[in-house]
Image: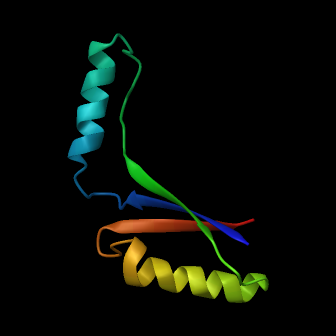
Amino acid sequence: MKAHIKVTLKKGVLDPQGKAIEGALGHLGFAGVLGVRQGKYFEIDIAETNKANAMTEVRAMCEKLIANTVIENYDIELA
């Protein structure tokens, strides 16, 4: 089974990289950009075939290592 994990900063957390990208897009002529937030994306192949067990396992991975849950949210999709 493959886990697709999207990690993003929580609302209210400053995002200097997103701001830098937003500014660069403006300088490149993309005047309609109103805001940019950056994040991370992970694909993890796991041996677990039971969807509920896989979700529990991947959630534990996110909580322990992949996401800093103080400042980040994560979203998991299993395929």
* Front residue of 43 and 63: 43
- Where does the image place residue 77, in percent across and percent down from the top left? 66, 65
* Front residue of 68 and 61: 61
Image check: 10 left or right of 74?
left
Quadrant including the C terminus: bottom right
**Residue visible at 41% across and 19% down in the picture:** 32
**Residue visible at 20% across and 44% down in the picture:** 16
Q: How is the image coloured?
A: rainbow
Quadrant in the rendering for residue 52: bottom right
Quadrant in the rendering for residue 19: top left
- Where does the image place residue 62, in percent across and percent down from the top left? 46, 77
Q: In the rendered view, would you say 44 is above or below 49?
A: above
- Where does the image place residue 3, in percent across and percent down from the top left? 64, 68
Instruction: Single out the residue that lies furthest toward the top.
Output: 29
Image check: 9 left or right of 51?
left
- State the count of labels: 0
Quadrant including the N terminus: bottom right
- Where does the image place residue 26, in percent across and percent down from the top left? 30, 18
Q: In the rendered view, would you say 36 is above or below 76?
A: above
**Residue visible at 25% across and 42% down in the picture:** 17
Q: In the rendered view, would you say 28 is above or below 55?
A: above
* Front residue of 22 and 34: 22
Instruction: Single out the residue that lies furthest toward the right.
Output: 50
Image check: 75 left or right of 63?
right
